[in-house]
Amino acid sequence: MARQLKVDMGKIKSECEFARDLGAESIQSVELVAAFEEEFDIDMDEDAALSVKSVGGAVKFISDVMKQQGKLS
Amino acid sequence: MYKNLTAEQIKQLQQQGCCAQDWKLVRIADGFDAARVGNVCFSGQVNIGSQKGTVKSAGGIEKASGIYNAMIINCAIGDDVRIANIGIHIANYDIESNVCIENVATMQTNPGASFGNGVEVSVLNEAGGREVTLFDELSVQFAYLMCLHRYRPEFINKLKAMANKYVEKIRSDRGKVATGAKIFSAGEIIDVNIGAGAIVNGAASLANGTILSCAESPTVVGTGVVAKDFIIAEGASVTGAANLDKVFVGQGTKVGRQFSAENSLFFANCEAFHGEACSIFAGPYTVTHHKSTLLIAGLFSFYNAGSGTNQSNHMYKLGPTHEGKLERGTKTGSFSYMMWPCSAGPFSVILGKHTRNFDTRDFPFTHIEADSDGKCNIVPGMHLTTVGTVRDGAKWPKRDRRKVGKKRDIISFDVFSPYTVGKMIKASSILKALADSTDRAIELVNINGAQMKRVLLRTSQKFYRTGIEMYLLEKVLARGKTAVEGGIEKLRKSFAADKDAVYSEEWVDIGGQLMPGQRIRDLMTAVEKGKISDIDTLYNELLKIQQLGAKDEWAWVKKAYETLSGVNLEKITKEEFLAAAEAYLAVKTKFLKLVLGDCEKEFDSQSRTGFGYNGTVQDIDEDFRQVRGEFNRNEFVLTMRKNVEEVETRIGKLKAKITACL
């Protein structure tokens, strides 16, 4: 996340919103989703993934998808 | 029938300050009223019609027809014409009935005038080689073929011959001001034909041109306009001191607010204000509204140029020889810059200062952004589901300003078509090959001068998959839905391609008209062989292709769907058709939700920046709500939501019908 958004790792908190707090523009959001998919070997639904606004929300969303796709027990 | 003036009439005219080189050459129709002619000097053959009524002058004020304060040389003046206060003279014009010409410095036709017809416009390549011949009947398709298809020289020669034949037909020693035209407060008008109902009000200088116009679609040329070597088509307006030199202005196009253009063609429904165009081919719906925007040596259609858009066609080597091609629906952001040669695929969005050449023509709906080094970074397919694309697709047909019977430019409006979807299929295959062959340690991949983050190779394929599936399934369901009630065999038969359809894997965009590649190749061959040898026949053949478009489209959809899905439509099963309906519902809903998601960004906290000035933090939201409204009440949002509901209902009904009937 820090690498994709080019922000200090220490600034990334669960409550941070991608656009407001981490400066993620549309294109970076797309890149972030792509990076998550590759990193966790999952396939995310774009409209659901792009509607996630915060870091905490992303963590939950990704873990849910991983569970659904059998990548996390 | 005209007759000579009587001695009494001549005497009266002389008493009213008139003179003639030879009164015998001044002939009049029944209804001529000598009392309505004053301070006029006649020279050469002059015919004058009846003068009984009134004619509308500037500001819609009715004035008596007649001729006052003018020198008239070799003119035929129709019934109820008003000519007044001509500074120098009107010479060699046929002026039809109900025309009003007031306060004009001079109007003259010189021997052998062609009225802008025959002018060669160095379009797209400023250094030449792609010249398009101007003529009244020029269409975007004719111009596109003449400009772009130089690789078939015999075909180009035939097109030139057609254009030249037309030019010779138009060539004349006499100009024409057609019925109901109004010309007020203008400077010089030399070798200009003026069409029916045209309004020329305050133009500074018009030379060697034609203003095509008709009563149902009057053309307007306004204050301070300077135009030379031009044709302005029906329903167009050229106003606000625009400056044109070797320019075609298409039907329903607006040029104004000091816009200047040279060696450029603007076809139907373009808008060009404030900026500058040089050697551009502006296909239908090309729009540039802002100052400091220079469009040069580019091919555009359905294009929107942001403020300060700039392009270079000159690398200071062999001259201004480079060309840019931005395919239909492309937008360039504020202060975007491109160094030609570049090509961008349809519906791309281009941002930043690009100092490298790139070719992304095979990648539609692409986000194209320059980094700080001027390198081109792309995200193919990203703009497939953006609000802007959806809104654009809906607005163009509604904004067709052409009111004439013959719309010369044939326009295909569809955003999703075999042209764009074919490109998506091709792009997906390129992206897949790259994804399969690129190591995960690689951060960027290169595509024809552009670079792309490797991690996005899969994402872009997903974008395209959405578009491909949505389009193909929509067409398959639309084709099959009426046949369902007739049972499975009728359904299967309904999927057969039409006998007169033409299939080509690759479709082409001929200046805004989409068609299978084979159609245009056949047409070019027919022209080369002399089977099509005049402008009208060529236009009718293109119109026929357009009319067969739905059949050709189905032939393409059928092949693409069968290839991608593995389902033979003419042997489709109930389960497969049901699955297609379910898949369509899923993909269409996903598409609409993505569009809604993009729209929602316009209402997020960042969009509220600057609202609630001089108020409290609480006032920000209220200020925003008052000015921008609410997401849940936004008209576009409501339409999209309604679309979701409509799709769910429609597919629900279809599924029920499939279950019941097959």
Image (cartoon, coloured by chain):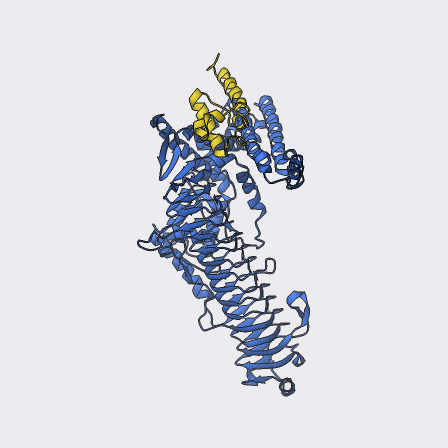
Chain colours: A yellow, B blue
Q: Position of residue B323 (x, y in %)?
A: 38, 50
Closest to the observer, B99 or B284: B284
Say which quadrant the C terminus of chain B sits in: top right
- Above or below residue A37? Residue B143 is below
Give me the residue at 52% from left, 77% from top: B74
Q: Establish if B486 lies above or below B326.
A: above
Q: Position of residue B571 (x, y in %)?
A: 47, 25
In the drawing, does residue B551 fall left or right of residue B150?
Answer: right
How many circles with numbers are drawn on the protein?
0
Corner quadrant of residue A37: top left
- What residue is rendered at 52% in x and 41% in y? B414
Residue A15 drawn above or below residue B380? above
Q: Residue furthest top?
A: A73
Whole-percent x, y for residue B214 in the image: 58, 60
Give the residue at x 52% y 52%.
B290
Whether residue B468 appears in this view of the structure is no
Residue B33 shows in the view: yes
Q: Residue furthest left?
A: B317
Q: Is residue B549 above or below residue B445?
A: below
Give residue B630's quadrant in the image: top right
| Front in this rendered view, residue B488 or B45 | B45
- Image quarter where the N terminus of chain B lies is bottom right
Whole-percent x, y for residue B602 in the image: 58, 37
